[in-house]
């Protein structure tokens, strides 16, 4: 059967001229082969000899042996006469960097092919090159075939090198080089145009900035016109100049600005897409940062994909490629029948009708919100429109916030002389911060500049922190920085709409996590933490005022301190441990509490999935910093020899926040794991959120949580995710007892230090275990119970100290076994609560 098919092929070759196409399995090669096949015997050469309606011979242009073997097969089947060899095969990427494949395939592959063809009778070697081998021109000028060969990056350089190989090594074979413009059709287009379309479709911030000449443009060519050019070159091969090159493309390119306006109108109905020219150096720096870190810039329309723009492309932004196609018109009888201006509406219509398929067609990575919408069976266009409309309405309702920040900016600018600052450095800091805040607050008035609100929040954070850096010499400077900094952050990101959340996260998905009874991000769940953070803030600011020299003494009702006249609190906050910090450690605690309050307020009851990064930041400030505060409390009597009552109060406020924060951290962790299993980008979901599986209890999440009697609100606020089994309450009591055995049973020396250390740890573990999601943590107390049975004999305790330690140890062993009631469900996490 195979020999019969081969014989039939050979017989057919005698009646039709043979055309050889390299890269025949590719998009252009297969299209061209199908076009030529009725009138020619088409033979394809490609690395992957896939199914085709014409013959394919497996060939690797990077291998001498493979090329020789393929052409030997061609010789055996079709003889030595070839009408035309159409050389399409080439390596291409858009990194802009050199790649060994450029030389191996594009340059040496061409040399290999030409060398092997010398034993054939070839009427024409037709090479597919690019107009980019030429040096670009200025707007208003045109490029012809005599223009200098001066490629701007690796890919066109490899094409120029291959052209030189052809000129030097074609031998007896006539050649024609077609220098083609960028390809497009009704659904697809070259990467530069495809990404320009995608940026505007997504309202990407980068679509508003351009580092080049906006009146510059790039020539394009429609797929059908390209096929006509190839066909004309092959059909007219006997009448063409023997060795020449021709530019092929539309001669009147759309400028970048014209393209922007057309796309803005077609996609969003905006008649003029405002594009701002930025310095190339700034654009390169931004592109380099994106390339290295691949961040996702918070914006009302989530991007969720790696950056396309690379630093080398910034230089190309000035390039203008308008073609003089006189030679193609004269020798090929070719003029373009299509025009990008007329075809662009069809490309956009196809994209809007089927965004998922449209992105696939233009070969651009879909943004996360589009992938999620596709996966959930949602209409991406409807989600985008609904999100934009809601975002715009919320922005207009809350324009008071950026205006108030503008007012605060003027306050910062004028505060140094009005308040008679004692620190020149702090005065300059507030002045510069005020100018920056004025600029970015004004920018944030535009609803598309959500990113600028985060810049304002960063400025507010600096204003909050600056009095510590410069050791504010007067109370008014410290107060001004604290109040203005908190207000700036609040007006920047607490006001609706929350910037940086993806459309699919905003418009779809549950309020209550799957398998849970409640939302851990509900307001009632956050209120206890916010209230406790206020206690910590006031205490820390009071202590910081003493450290900064604004007040002469600090109140402590219980601890007298050492032999000097200072009380325990004063001794602690002026100790070598406190002075080891480069700034006031109490002031640093105040800043942390202030940020806790603000991050506790940001976001909705769905922030466990809409703002995972914020939940993790909130938890980071509470859990690890709470443990740091605990360590400071532990070392007070051991290293310094006294206690600080106000420090104990602030540490207790921080410690009590931990059990209230853990359920939200668990819900967010479960959510991220589900989205990763669903194939989503973990980084994208972490930064901009996503939808999630529907919850059976989600109807409860839509109720107004404050539309209930106050006693119910107070109960839910205090008990959400937290319960107080009697055994854990007793463990906390044991821990308190152990911390003060110096006073209760007269413990001394190392034994007193051991009791204090174990007592503090028992309290910490027991308080954390009050969170139902962290109930297994209580089992750590068993180890502390065992330690208490040993320490009296290791540290030589006396009398009551021995009894105290043994009784407390046995009690901890008994009390730590019981789990206590767990009142809520936490999805699959419930299985781990033992």
Image (tube, grey):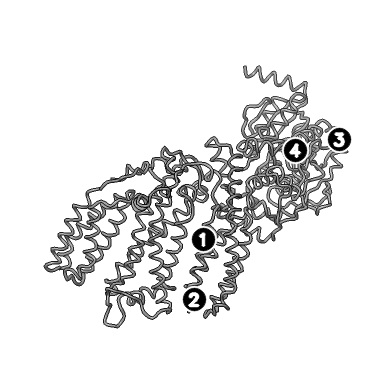
Q: Which residue is mark 3?
A: 333
Q: Residues within 10 Å of mark 3 (few under 14, many from 20)?
A: few
Query: At which x and y percent is residue 743?
Result: 20, 71
Q: Which residue is mark 2?
A: 476
Q: Residue furthest left?
A: 799
Name the mark nearer the viewer: 3 or 2.
2
Name the mark nearer the viewer: 4 or 3.
4
Which residue is at the front of the view, 290 or 59?
290
Q: Earlier in the sequence, mark 3 or mark 2?
A: 3
Q: Residues within 10 Å of mark 4 (few under 14, many from 20)?
A: some
Q: Residue at x 78, y 30 (%)?
A: 83
Describe residue 408's horizontal placement relative to residue 772 as left or right: right
Query: At which x and y percent is residue 598?
Result: 47, 60
Q: Residues within 10 Å of mark 1 (few under 14, many from 20)?
A: many
Q: Which residue is mark 4?
A: 343
Q: Which residue is mark 1?
A: 490
């Amino acid at each position: 059967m195979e020999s019969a098919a081969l014989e039939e092929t050979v017989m057919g070759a005698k009646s039709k001229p043979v055309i050889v196409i390299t890269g025949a399995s590719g998009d252009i090669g297969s299209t061209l082969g199908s076009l030529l096949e009725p009138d020619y015997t088409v033979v394809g050469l490609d690395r992957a000899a896939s199914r085709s309606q014409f013959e394919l011979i497996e060939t690797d242009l990077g291998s001498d042996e493979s090329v020789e073997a393929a052409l030997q097969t061609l010789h055996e089947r079709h003889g030595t006469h070839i009408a035309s060899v159409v050389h399409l095969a080439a390596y291409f990427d858009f990194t802009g960097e050199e790649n060994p494949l450029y030389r191996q395939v594009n340059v040496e592959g061409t040399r290999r092919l030409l060398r092997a063809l010398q034993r054939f009778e070839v009427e024409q070697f037709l090479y597919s090159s690019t107009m980019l081998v030429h040096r670009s021109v200025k707007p208003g000028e045109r490029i012809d075939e005599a223009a200098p060969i001066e490629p701007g990056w690796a890919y066109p350089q490899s094409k120029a090198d291959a052209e030189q190989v052809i000129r030097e090594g074609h031998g007896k074979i006539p050649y024609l080089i077609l220098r083609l413009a960028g390809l497009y059709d009704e659904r697809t287009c070259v990467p530069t145009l495809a990404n320009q379309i995608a940026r505007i479709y997504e309202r990407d911030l980068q679509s508003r900035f351009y580092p080049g000449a906006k009146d510059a443009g790039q020539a394009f060519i429609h797929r059908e016109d390209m096929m006509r050019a190839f066909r004309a070159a092959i059909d007219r091969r006997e009448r063409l100049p023997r060795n020449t090159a021709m530019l092929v493309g539309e001669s009147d390119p759309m400028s970048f600005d014209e393209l922007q306006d057309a796309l803005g109108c077609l996609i969003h109905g905006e008649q003029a897409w405002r594009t701002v020219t930025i310095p190339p150096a700034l654009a390169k720096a931004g592109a380099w940062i994106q390339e290295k870190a691949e961040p996702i810039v918070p914006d009302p329309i989530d991007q969720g994909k790696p950056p396309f723009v690379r630093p080398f492309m910034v230089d190309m932004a000035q390039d203008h490629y308008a073609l003089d196609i006189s030679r193609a018109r004269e020798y090929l009888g070719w003029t373009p029948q299509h025009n990008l201006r007329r075809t662009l509406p069809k490309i956009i219509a196809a994209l809007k009708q089927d965004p998922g398929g449209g992105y696939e067609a233009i070969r651009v990575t879909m943004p996360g919100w589009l992938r999620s919408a596709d996966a959930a069976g949602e209409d991406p266009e409807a989600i985008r429109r609904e999100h934009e409309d809601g975002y715009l309405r919320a922005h207009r309702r809350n324009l008071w916030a950026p205006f108030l920040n503008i007012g605060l900016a003027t306050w910062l600018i004028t505060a140094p002389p009005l308040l008679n600052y004692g620190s020149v450095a702090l005065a300059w800091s507030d002045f510069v911060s005020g100018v920056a805040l004025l600029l970015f607050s004004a920018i944030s008035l535009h609803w598309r500049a959500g990113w600028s609100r985060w810049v304002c929040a960063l400025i507010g954070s600096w204003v909050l922190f600056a009095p510590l850096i410069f050791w504010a010499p007067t109370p008014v400077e410290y107060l001004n920085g604290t109040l203005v900094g908190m207000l700036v952050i609040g007006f920047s990101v607490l006001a609706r709409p929350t910037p940086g959340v993806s459309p699919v996260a905003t418009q779809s998905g549950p309020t209550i996590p799957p398998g849970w009874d409640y939302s851990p991000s509900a307001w009632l769940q956050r209120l206890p933490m916010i209230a406790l953070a206020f206690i910590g803030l006031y205490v820390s600011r009071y202590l910081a005022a003493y450290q900064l020299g604004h007040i002469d003494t600090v109140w402590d009702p219980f601890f007298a301190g050492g032999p000097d006249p200072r009380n325990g609190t004063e001794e602690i906050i002026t100790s070598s441990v406190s002075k080891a910090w480069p700034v006031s450690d109490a002031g640093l605690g105040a800043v942390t509490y202030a940020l806790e309050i603000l991050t506790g307020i940001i976001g909705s009851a769905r922030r466990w999935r809409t703002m995972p990064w914020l939940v993790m930041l909130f938890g980071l400030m509470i859990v690890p910093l709470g443990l740091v505060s605990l360590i400071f409390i532990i070392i007070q009597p051991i290293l310094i020899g006294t206690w600080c009552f106000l420090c104990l109060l602030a540490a207790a406020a921080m410690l009590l926040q931990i059990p209230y924060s853990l359920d939200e951290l668990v819900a967010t962790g479960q959510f991220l794991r589900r989205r990763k299993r669903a194939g989503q980008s973990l980084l994208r979901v972490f930064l901009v959120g996503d939808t999630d599986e529907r919850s059976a209890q989600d109807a409860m999440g839509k109720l107004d949580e404050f539309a209930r009697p106050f006693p119910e609100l107070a109960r839910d606020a205090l008990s959400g995710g937290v319960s107080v089994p009697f055994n854990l309450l007793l463990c906390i009591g044991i821990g308190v007892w152990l911390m003060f055995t110096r006073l209760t049973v007269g413990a001394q020396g190392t034994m007193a230090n051991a009791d204090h250390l174990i007592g503090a740890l028992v309290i910490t573990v027991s308080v954390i275990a009050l969170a139902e999601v962290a109930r297994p943590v209580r089992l750590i107390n068993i180890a502390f119970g065992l330690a208490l049975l040993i320490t009296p004999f290791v540290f030589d305790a006396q009398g009551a100290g021995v009894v105290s330690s043994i009784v407390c140890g046995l009690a901890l062993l008994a009390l730590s076994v019981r789990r206590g009631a767990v009142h809520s469900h936490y999805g699959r996490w419930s299985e781990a609560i033992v």
